[in-house]
Image: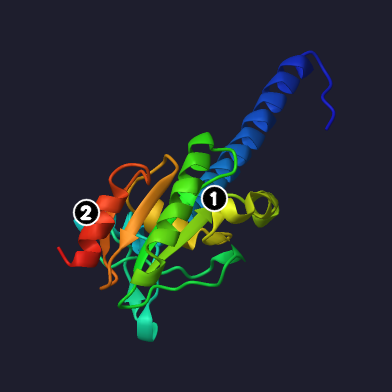
Amino acid sequence: MRFEGCGSGLVKFIWWNLRFYRERDIVIKRSGIVIVMLFCVVFAGCRKKDAGAEAEGPDTAAKAIKPIAGKGGGGAVARMPSKIGDAAWNLNGLEFIKGKAVKIEPGKVYIVEFWATWCRPCLTSILHLTEVAHKYKDKNVVVVGISIEEAGVAKPFVEKQGAKMDYNVAVDPTRNVSDGYMRAFGCNGIPHAFIVDGEGKIAWQGHPMANMEQVLDGVLAGT
């Protein structure tokens, strides 16, 4: 559009301003529409998420810290022990690198010990557990040493120990057993042992060089 004459400058100024405000109004209207659409999408998403959420209460908290469940006898869902007298956790998933595979059976007493090749106190515990295994082998006592390391690390060490480590030894690649004993009882240090009585219940837990044999004698005597 062309403007001529003495008033052309003023006319141009008015025309360009009208055009600017008209275009600005269009932009504002379009921006408003976009904002409304985005708000609807966000609001719908939040509503969808909230619909599936659960209120935080005693049941929710318990569910959040629920121990890992596993298959017990007859396919029943078992619960990890948390105190002396609870049913012992299974030994499923262990990879035995010495001796034979072991599982918790009624009528037998078990010493389940956790160790590592880098743990110096474990070296003393190994000799002690060998003595215990020999001393109680005719009393249905089964000793299982479970390394918290991989088989590639633990097996050469066990082979080097030879007769000094004369009991069943395994690694726990799935961490099922470590979780069911060490984590379930809040234990972090090794060596650490558990005694499982003839009824399949946790009778004791502690350092294998402490009063383990005294407790073991009491378990075998039924006291």
Residue kind at label 2, given as amino acid type: Gly
Q: Specify whether residue 146 is in view.
A: yes
172 sits to left or right of 74: right
Residue kind at label 1, given as amino acid type: Ile
- State yes or no: discs 1 and 2 in contact (Cβ < 8 Å): no
Q: Which residue is mark 2?
A: 57
Task: Please identify the quarter of the rendering in which residue 71 is found.
Answer: bottom left
| Coordinates of residue 170 in the picture (x, y in percent) | 56, 61
Specify which label sits upstream in the sequence, 1 or 2: 2
Residue projecting furthest to the top: 6
60 sits to left or right of 36: left
Q: Residue at x 44, y 53 (%)?
A: 131
Give the SS element for disc 1.
Answer: loop
Vertical placement of 191 versus 71: above or below?
Answer: above
In the foreground, 88 or 124: 124
Residue projecting furthest to the bottom: 74
Task: Please identify the quarter of the rendering in which residue 217 is found.
Answer: bottom left
Q: Residue at x 70, y 27 (%)?
A: 15
Residue projecting furthest to the left: 223
| Coordinates of residue 70 in the picture (x, y in percent) | 41, 71
Q: Residue at x 83, y 33 (%)?
A: 1
In the foreground, 79 or 22: 79
| Coordinates of residue 4 in the picture (x, y in percent) | 84, 21
What is the spatial separation of the Cα atoms under label 1 and label 2, in whole angstroms? 35 Å
Quarter of the figure with the C terminus: bottom left
Vertical placement of 117 versus 152: above or below?
Answer: above
Q: Specify whether residue 85 is in view.
A: no
In the foreground, 5 or 170: 170
**Residue 148 disc label:** 1
212 sits to left or right of 12: left
| Coordinates of residue 144 in the picture (x, y in percent) | 47, 61
